[in-house]
Amino acid sequence: MGSIPPCSRLSTLNEFDVIVVGAGHAGIEAALASARIGLRTACVTMRLDRIGHLPCNCSIGGPAKGHMAREVDALGGQMAVTTDYAVTHIRRVGTGKGPAVQTIRAHVCKTLYPAIMQKVMGEQSSLSLIEGTVLTVLSDGGKVSGLRMLLGGEVTDLHAKSVVLTTGTFLNGLCHEGQKKTVAARSGDNASTDLSSFLSDLGVNLRRFKTGTTPRVKLSTIDFAKTPPLESEPEAGPVSFVHDRTYPLRALLPCWQTRTTPDVHALIQENLHQSAMYSGQIEGVGPRYCPSIEDKIVRFADKQSHPIFLEQEEWDSESVYVQGVSTSLPADVQIKLLRRVPGLENIEMLRPGYAVEYDMADPLQLTPQLMSKLLGGLFLAGQLNGTSGYEEAAGQGIVAGINAARWAREEPPVEFLRSNSFIGVMIDDLVTKGVDDPYRMLTSRAEHRLLLRHDNADQRLTPQGREVGLCGDQRWERFIDKYEKIQLGRSVLENTYFYPTHNEFFSEAGTAELPGKLSLFDLLKRPEMNLDRVLELAVSSGLTVTIAEDPQVREQLNLAGAYDGYIQKQEKLVGQSKRLEEMRIPDHYDFLKMGGLSYESKEKLSRIRPTTVGQASRIPGVRPSDIALLIGHLRVGMKQHANT
């Protein structure tokens, strides 16, 4: 996995189709997507050895995030593939809830994961990796023309038709540990100031957000007698659809759980004045759904304890991530806090936690393709857009990479809808509703989440990945084979019947007798049934039924039967909303001239500039009566256009 030499395959002409700035999770997916589609792509980053770096936790997936990791994979992305090779721990989450919530959460080795990403990036054809500092984005005639950067100490211009900014927490990054401030994007990385100035001058609305990380502690100083283990579940299967199983290079590891105590809470309360967040030192807004330990103690004062998970960061390191204790308290308070947690009484802290403030760009100024409304060919993705999390960044990265490539080729953009992906839900939320705090994907954000399960992400998105040029032949053949087996299996179940003469077998199985002719698929809908029981009954009844042994195929058939009624209802709702999504609003439509609209709706529609009536209907504050009026105006306009 050797290191990648600076300026690997740098074109002597400095001419590219797409330039991606940043090589975190968003930047990796954007650069690989553009290059795999076939465009000359450059990925510019301040440190090539930090490609794929995991600055916070070591996990990929989890509630809703696992869905998005699967969706990136289904489109032809890299995150899930690398996760399967670097996985150290894996388990299923949401198993006590319905299939819409269930997914996978994996831990990866924090040295192997970036090493694999660096190797993949370095070997990708059409992709040049450049180490340097970006100073500004260049433009000509209201469109991107390239960027200016410091390369080897000299100012150099790179030319391109599209630029994708994936700067994470780097823009004016400021780290906080108690009263200690460090100008940095994260531990060990310098902040960037020039791009913030460029965006501000362009008219981008910049705000300050905040995120944080936890202390790391030494594995050998944990008292495991007080920390129950959570073992890995290899049966959870792979994250990527291109694998039949997980591919750990070594044995899977456990993680451990413990909890805070009232004694811990009391210590935090006593030292809130030293917290960077609560002393007023931090201006940025922190994540609502991943709060610091200080936030938890204050906001949930009635709670006697909060869960903590101890997660190993590497196979060959003693570093353990203390999940649940994100903090900006001083280091000396952090060690006291940890030593009041059961199992950590004699802990050695390897690195304190800290908070980081950074500039983010208002996503309301982006199109649904993640292109800036202020400069053609400029795309923004990842934490820069006000999101939080590796998977959210990767999802935006692959969308921005696809659309930057299509812009460079002067091809129509690709949109991802709320009805076909969590990626579509996230992007629509960002560009339609905006963000008040770092956005985290939740299954509850998706109104059609039963259709957006993590297990069927390939059926939803792989054809789209194939269409844009990201899905290679091997992935496509696997997909087609699985899809055909599912369709054949469903056809067999729907066209094989039980008759009342088989009722003796139903009595023995403990299920209600048949009222008449009944297909195997209809029997599968009964709550006491599953595919195995149905097939057992069929064999006992003398029926010949052949269903593929592939567990993923059988899972799909099981879910199709068990939730058939609910799935049909959601598909009907999607069909109804599709009409609004297909009703386009002209690019320069003048909402201010529309009679009858409320002032609030005129202002919001003019500012956000929705591209469809469906998007307009989701803007907070826009009334249903205003949408009805908008539809009427658009229909009149279409009739007038047709008559000219």
Image (tube, rainbow, N blue to C red):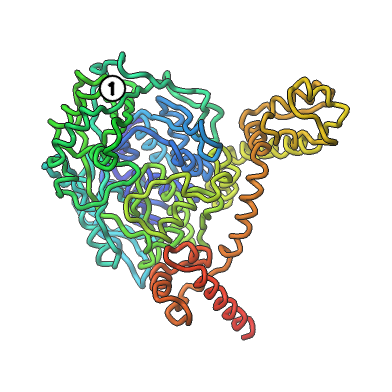
**What residue sits 29% from the left and 67% below the top?**
202
At which x and y percent is residue 475? 57, 39
At which x and y percent is residue 559? 63, 36
Looking at this view, name the residue that lies furthest to the front. 302
At which x and y percent is residue 380? 37, 56
Label 1: which secondary element: loop
- Amino acid marked by disc 1: Ser
Looking at this view, name the residue that lies furthest to the right. 501
Q: Is residue 245 above or below residue 466?
A: above
Q: Is residue 551 above or below residue 409?
A: above
Residues 403 and 369: in front is 369
Q: Which of the 4 image quarters holds residue 335? A: top left
Q: Which of the 4 image quarters holds residue 187? A: top left
573 to the left or right of 96: right
Q: Which residue is mark 1?
A: 317
**What residue sits 44% from the left and 47% below the top?**
395
634 to the left or right of 125: right
Looking at this view, name the residue that lies furthest to the bottom. 644
Number of labels in the image equals 1
**What residue sits 19% from the left and 39% below the top?**
328
At which x and y percent is residue 127? 40, 47
**What residue sits 79% from the left and 23% below the top?**
507
* Residue 78 is at least partly visible in this image: no
512 to the left or right of 23: right
Q: Which of the 4 image quarters holds residue 220? A: top left
The quarter in which the C terminus is drawn is bottom right
The quarter in which the N terminus is drawn is top left
* Residue 101 is at least partly visible in this image: yes
